[in-house]
Image (cartoon, rainbow, N blue to C red):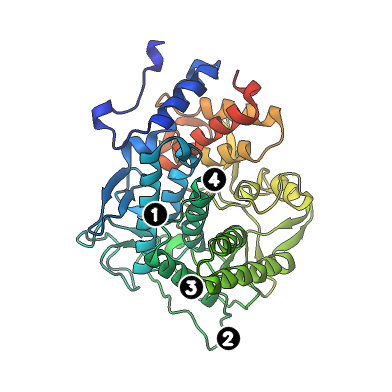
């Protein structure tokens, strides 16, 4: 239909083309009965490959893949993992795509070795950051230095996901092992309490009038969890122990330990990863739950180790809503179900409902702004056909005719939106459709 013409760049302008991804677009689109939904899927799934990757080989001949977020010309560890994650299932059918993903892992390892506390990086050290005046150790090549635990987890997650998809260990070289050691040391060090002599070397201050960027000096106590001063939204935490990021760490550290053991590679690192996972999980089970007056026992979003807990959820992954997606628990786990009921209700201060839709937002843009990413994640973590179908309807009716998934839209008007080019949200939506085609094809056909 003319109104559903492709929004993808012309073939000669695409940054990378995967024949396996193109074949999947054709197969899945043909199975989607709704033409608008099929058009949205065909635009979104390849968006990361079409527009955000720079694929080269470094001076040592190793693949090197730099992945920008979209409208920001920098690479986030978290975003880059999530942007390419939906393509892992295609690696067995596309050797060049496999090499491209290996290049992302090499680049992430280089970033972690450069600065394990940084969240975003430039392609090279010649670019000047707009955050160069932040009161922290800004090194050449670093775009932003907000320490987020999930950034290191994202590096582990992609490495382990790549290994599970390919059984290829070639990219786990000495540089990668060095990055793993640095990341594990950082996670372990950030378990320390404020009163301990073993203190964090990380400091951060930004000249800003926005409260979400003003680094506080709040007390915290060792509780097994590892600190994350910033959330996956790049907003400051209220309490330093971010529960969903630590839950993600448990999963990724266990996967890392298992992979290293199977490869008989750096068994000391494997043991350290397994030990960290057990300590963090023990802390989550003993400190991260709270009795809510309406929802019963649920997980807090953040804690301080003294009993202080913050009850909310943010759309950015890792989130409480995303815990089954990340592998921390099953969808039908009672604790998760109660937590899910909370975060998808008005009891969550960042849940919004309006004339255009409903979903979770966050402080990053503010109350009333819904992140489509949260609607996609709601569908990916649901066991209900009716709920998933409703999420598909919301996603289809809130792209404002653009053919892409945005960062946020205003609850009463999807024509008011932020970030028209946000590759993570696009490929996550593509992952949802591919997952439904495999597991619940009746919802598409």
Of labels 3 and 2, the one closer to you: 3
Q: Residue at x 65, y 21 (%)?
A: 442
Relative to residue 248, is residue 180 drawn left or right?
left
Of labels 1 and 2, the one closer to you: 1
**Upstream in the sequence, badge 3 or badge 1?**
1
Residue 37 makes an appearance in the image: yes
Q: Residue at x 63, y 28 (%)?
A: 390
Q: Which residue is mark 3?
A: 186
**Upstream in the sequence, badge 3 or badge 2?**
3
To which quarter of the image does residue 354 belong?
top right
Marks 2/4: CA–CA distance: 35 Å
Marks 1/4: CA–CA distance: 20 Å
Q: Which residue is mark 1?
A: 76
**Upstream in the sequence, badge 3 or badge 4?**
3
Q: Position of residue 20 (x, y in %)?
A: 43, 31
Helix or strand or loop: what does disc 2 sit on? loop
* Tag 1–tag 2 contact (CB < 8 Å): no
Q: Position of residue 171 (x, y in %)?
A: 40, 56
- Label 4 crowding class (10 Å Cα cut-off): few <14, some 14-19, many 20+? many
**Rendered position, 355 above or below 338:** above
Q: Which residue is mark 4?
A: 361
């Amino acid at each position: 239909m003319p109104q559903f013409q492709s929004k993808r760049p012309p073939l000669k302008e695409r940054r990378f083309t995967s024949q396996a991804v193109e074949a999947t677009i054709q197969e899945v689109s043909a199975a989607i009965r709704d033409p608008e939904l099929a058009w949205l899927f065909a635009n979104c799934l390849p968006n990361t490959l079409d527009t955000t990757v720079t694929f080269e080989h470094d001076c040592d001949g190793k693949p090197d893949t730099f992945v920008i977020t979209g409208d920001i010309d920098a690479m986030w560890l978290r975003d880059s993992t999530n942007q390419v994650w939906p393509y892992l299932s295609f690696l067995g059918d596309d050797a060049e795509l496999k090499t491209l993903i290996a290049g992302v892992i090499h680049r992430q390892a280089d970033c972690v070795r450069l600065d394990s506390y940084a969240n975003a990086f430039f392609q090279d050290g010649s670019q000047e950051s707009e955050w160069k005046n932040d009161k922290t150790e800004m090194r050449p090549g670093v775009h932003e230095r907000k320490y987020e635990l999930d950034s290191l987890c994202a590096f582990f997650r992609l490495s382990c996901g790549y290994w599970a998809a390919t059984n290829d260990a070639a990219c786990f070289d000495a540089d990668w092992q060095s990055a793993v050691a640095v990341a594990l040391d950082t996670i372990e060090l950030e378990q320390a309490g404020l009163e301990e002599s073993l203190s964090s070397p990380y400091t951060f201050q930004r000249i800003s009038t926005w409260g979400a960027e003003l680094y506080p000096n709040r007390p915290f106590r060792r509780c097994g969890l590892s600190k994350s001063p910033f959330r996956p939204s790049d907003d400051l935490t209220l309490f330093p122990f971010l529960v969903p990021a630590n839950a993600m760490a448990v999963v990724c550290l266990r996967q890392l330990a298992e992979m290293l053991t199977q490869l008989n590679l750096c068994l000391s690192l494997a043991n350290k990863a397994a030990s960290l996972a057990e300590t963090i999980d023990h802390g989550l089970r003993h400190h991260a739950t709270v009795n809510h007056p309406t929802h019963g026992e649920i997980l807090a979003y953040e804690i301080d180790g003294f009993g202080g807990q913050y009850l909310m959820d943010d759309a950015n992954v890792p989130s409480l809503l995303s815990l089954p997606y990340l592998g921390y628990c099953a969808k039908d786990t009672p604790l998760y179900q109660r937590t899910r009921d909370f975060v998808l209700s008005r009891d969550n201060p960042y849940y919004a409902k309006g004339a255009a839709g409903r979903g979770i937002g966050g402080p990053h843009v503010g109350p009333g702004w819904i992140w489509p990413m949260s609607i996609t994640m709601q569908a990916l973590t649901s066991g209900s056909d009716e709920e998933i179908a409703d999420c598909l309807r919301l996603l289809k009716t809130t792209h404002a005719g653009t053919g892409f998934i945005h960062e946020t839209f205003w609850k009463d008007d999807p024509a008011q939106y932020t970030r028209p080019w946000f590759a993570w949200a696009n490929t996550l939506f593509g992952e949802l459709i591919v997952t439904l085609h495999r597991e619940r094809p009746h919802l598409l056909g």
